[in-house]
Image: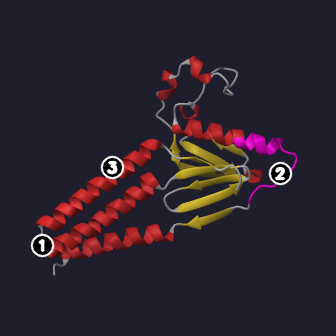
Amino acid sequence: MNNVEIFRPRGSIVAAYLAYVVIAIMVTQTILTSSVHESFVGAIWGSFTATLSYLILHRPKIELFDEGVRITNPFEEITVGWQLVESIDTKYTMSIQIGGKSIHAWAATAPGRYHGRTIHPSEMRGLNVGADGIIRPGDSPRSHSGTASYLANLRLKSFRDRPSNNGCDSRVVFNKTGLIVLITSALLGTILNIYHF
């Protein structure tokens, strides 16, 4: 992987760290003011909530590099070589199309449908806008999906313009650890809520 560029919205990272702080305060308060059983249950539910915050807010990202793209979602990490990417879309999220299948990126969500009305023409200079001059809200340079798709399209064009089109191998890695921690903490928390010791 050469020239790696990581796209991850700052707002998601800030929200994730705020969630971690709030969870830590609540668990600490529970441990200091409650019984051993309630403290244990609070710590388990805190673990569940922190894991959920990590998976939804902190983990998602898009890594762009010369040979391909890696989309990290809560439970999957998908690496695709540029030679397989047919197109890049921004309908609901930034997504790449491969063999008729769409791979969506949680890190680059599209805004609501009214966002397109707030775009000033000066923001569109240098962007490849259709002949009618109308863009979809997901293509807006002020949206996460628009920014990510613009960066990805630059890399894809650069890859296609090179004489040697050797992209990376494609692979999917499932996030077993995150799923196991999430399910285990949910089950333990539920069981301990029902049965007291």
Structural crowding at the residue carrying mark 3, measured as other residues with C-alpha within 10 Å and reported as few (<14), some (14–19) or many (≥20)? few
The region drawn magenta spans 155-168
Q: Which amino acid does label 3 sit on?
A: Leu
Q: Which amino acid does label 2 sit on?
A: Asn
Residue found farthest to the bottom: 197
Question: What residue is pinned by disc 2?
Answer: 165
Question: What residue is pinned by disc 1?
Answer: 35
If you read the primary sequence from the N terminus, does the residue marked by circle 3 or circle 2 appear first?
A: 3
Q: Which mark is residue 110?
A: none
* Quarter that holds the N terminus: bottom right
Residue found farthest to the top: 121
Q: What element carries label 3?
A: helix
Task: Determine if the magenta segment contains residue 167.
Answer: yes
Q: Is mark 2 on a helix, strand or loop?
A: loop
What's the CA distance linking mark 1 and mark 3? 27 Å
Q: Which amino acid does label 1 sit on?
A: Ser
